[in-house]
Image (cartoon, rainbow, N blue to C red):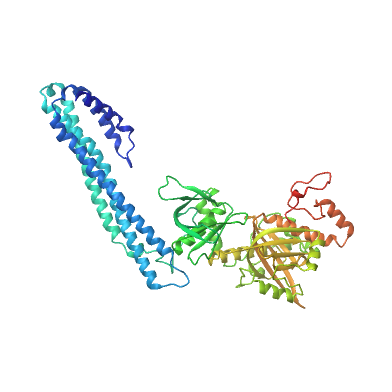
Amino acid sequence: MCLATQQLSKQLLAYEKQHFALGKGDEEVISTLHYFSKVVDELNILHSELAKQLADTMVLPIIQFREKDLTEVSTLKDLFGLASNEHDVSMAKYSRLPKRKENEKLKAEVAKEVANARRKQHLSSLQYYCALNALQYRKRVAMMEPMLGYTRGQINFFKKGAEMFSKRMDSFLSSVSDMVQSIQGELDAEAEKMRVSQQDLISVNESVYTPDSDVTSPVINRNLIQKAGYLNLRNKTGLVTTTWERLYFFTQGGNLMCQPRGAVAGGLIQDLDNCSVMAVDCEDRRYCFQITTPTGKAGITLQAESKKEYEEWICAINNISRQIYLTDNPEAAAIKLNQTALQAVTPITTFGKKHEAHHSSQNVRNTENDKTTPNESAGAQDSTQLIALGTPIQFDIVLPATEFLDQNRGGRRANPFGESEDSSKNEEEDSLLQQMFVVRFLGSMAVQSDDTSEVIYEAMRQVLAARAIHNIFRMTESHLMVTSKSLRLIDPQTQVTRISFELATVTQFAAHQDNRRLIGFVVHLSETPGEDSMSAYVFESNTEGEKICYAISLGKEIIEAQKDPEALAQLMKSVPLTNDGKFMLLNDQSEEDGTTHEEGEESEA
């Protein structure tokens, strides 16, 4: 017994080093146990005759705590795990419901099964959490009560107890007893509080557990800069086979993280900076969207469980990709961004001054524009003078319509098999400028003026606002070929020209002043004698829009310079050329001695 009590004293001092799950309120217990350790050291020579009392007042409560309380928590944990597995099975069955051929009866049965599984999981989790909360109090009682009985047995059993302990020790034991009773009272109050909470939570409407219950009018928060929740991740298992895995996703800064069940922490799955996200149709599943990397490469495909989650995830990823989270007040920046999009459908009466100085590429129309008086160029215009009210917006370029327009303008019809005619090849070979950019078409609309670049900013504002309000996230990726004669939009898959404009018809072009990847230009066409049409086209580029503006500006300079051989020669001297005599734009560094560059340094075109 002496050896046992010595070991007990050491264990009491080591209690503060134990890491108990969800531990709280242990500071007072630790200080009390330290004092008990001193008491045990004084009594260790007198405990040889206390075996029976120790078995009744000390060993039994500990065994009960171990066999009853801890076993109960372990059992509830297993039940919670089984309920979670059943919920995953029912969610997998619900996710496999077809979108095209919906069976309302089957959908209702599966939704009811999901609701029942969620209710069961919710109930088991509540019981498990309640047991964990109660365990925090019981484990404190399990440590205090045995020591209380142990100490009192010592005093009562030996006559020397009265001589060894003073009234100070009696008051200490009384305070410990009061503390145990106080903890027990807190346990009872917590148990009653949790019982009431369980009743309130269980009595809620079943629609809370039903997935996609508010599909008709979900309340969507478009100002999110972080998001977390379960999504289905599409994984390729073969050339044509895929699997879907339900995982927990969350955003952290500019990263999308994924944490499988049972993992200690999440891992990086996608860098969201400058990425784009769009809705996709995937394997007849609803609410699917795809994240595309800044280089245009298709990234991961995910599926949300409801329309609300689907749209909030897309909005959150869009906000994060614009690096709003790096601002001083990201929430306010996201709200302001979305408010600007919502207000864009209501025409404003005046334009503020964008910048004091514009790039030269934004103000190259004709020689007549250069002679405009300062008062006329600086004057603010009404937005209705730039774009008429109710002007429709085209969000995609359809090839047959493009071919029809080309025929009306007398242009060549694009070969649908992607094979260029010899004449078009000769045009490209004869062109002094060839530059290709990866762009995504956002929209186009008719405009009423091309006298100022403000019309491009207004078109950008209205196109982006319409996409945000109508939840249009799909964008068509194309290759924009800029030559010294024309602008051509080429399908990257088939190499078919979707639309083509002569460079002389491009009267205005500009990049967005805040979002450098937005680029727009105005095309002025003469359809019939005396009738002109003007349209603004808006794109998102993988590179800075200023580079595209520079390429267009250089092409127009080449057109003017070709009229004068001396001017053309002077222009060719001022701009670096490739080995085959083309103008080089992407290489920022040029050699001062005018020597030719290596083939690897040439532009991508």
Relative height, residue 497 to residue 167 (above, below): below
| Position in image of residue 166 (x %, y %) | 16, 24
Q: Within the image, what quadrant is residue 483 found in? A: bottom right
Foreground pick, 91 / 386: 91
Q: Within the image, what quadrant is residue 62 found in? A: top left
Foreground pick, 565 / 509: 565
Q: Is residue 602 left or right of residue 226?
A: right
| Position in image of residue 464 (x %, y %) | 59, 63
Seen from this angle, which residue lies furthest front?
A: 238
| Position in image of residue 168 (x %, y %) | 18, 26
Relative height, residue 77 to residue 217 (above, below): above
> Does residue 234 appear in this view?
yes
Which residue appears at 19% of the width and 30% of the height? 172
Seen from this angle, which residue lies furthest right?
A: 566
Q: Is residue 191 left or right of residue 315?
A: left
The quarter in which the C terminus is drawn is: bottom right
Which residue appears at 37% of the width and 66% of the height? 111
Relative height, residue 147 to residue 379 (above, below): above
> Does residue 165 appear in this view?
no
Foreground pick, 321 / 47: 47
Which residue appears at 53% of the width and 67% of the height? 470
Q: Is residue 315 left or right of residue 537?
A: left
Seen from this angle, which residue lies furthest bottom?
A: 529
Relative height, residue 575 to residue 210 (above, below): above
Q: Within the image, what quadrant is residue 121 found in? A: bottom left
